[in-house]
Image: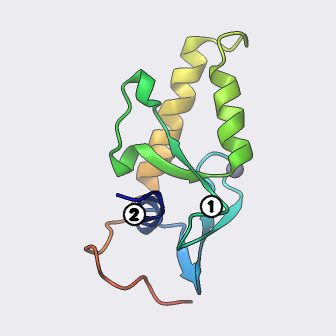
Amino acid sequence: MSLARTFDQVARTDSTFERRGGLWVGKCLICNGPIAFDAQTGEGATLEHIRARSRGGTDDPRNLALVHASCNHEKGRRWDPRRRRSQLDYDAFIDCLLQRRLDRWRDAPPPGTPPPPNR
Ligand SMILES: [Zn+2]
């Protein structure tokens, strides 16, 4: 699956996202701020594994989120063992993000279905 296709899949299953012309517009999972990306290329957002693959996270869409590059970077910094964040804090943060992803979940239409109409 191409990266842009994965972006599309994540946006389809996140109820904060809607199609506006060639863009998907929604909310960053980490900061809840507005985020938009090109539906063809994914440009404008980065794909986040909420639970890192190195920590047992999978490519399941429930573990994937669309976030700002800066938020992705900040999350990476939190994980940096040189920072004094405790493992417990980090786990709580991950659990919070996973829950937020589920709270936003919507079932995606089958592949090949046109994107939701513009509102
Ligand atoms: Zn963000």
Q: What residue is shown with label 2?
A: 9
* Residue 26 shown left or right of residue 107 in the figure: right
Q: Residue at x 71, y 57 (%)?
A: 33
- Which quarter shows the N terminus? bottom left
Instruction: State whether label 2 is within 8 Å of ligand 1.
Output: no
User: Which residue type does callout 1 highlight?
Assistant: Lys
- Which quarter shows the C terminus? bottom right
* Residue 1 shown left or right of residue 37 in the figure: left
Badge 1 local density, few (<14 within 10 Å), some, or many (20+)? many
Q: Position of residue 73 (x, y in %)?
A: 70, 36
Q: What residue is shown with label 1?
A: 27
Q: Residue at x 42, y 82 (%)?
A: 115
User: Which residue type does callout 2 highlight?
Assistant: Gln
Q: In this rendering, is residue 7 above or below 39?
A: above
Query: Which residue ends up furthest to the left in the rendered image?
Result: 110
Q: Position of residue 92 (x, y in %)?
A: 53, 25
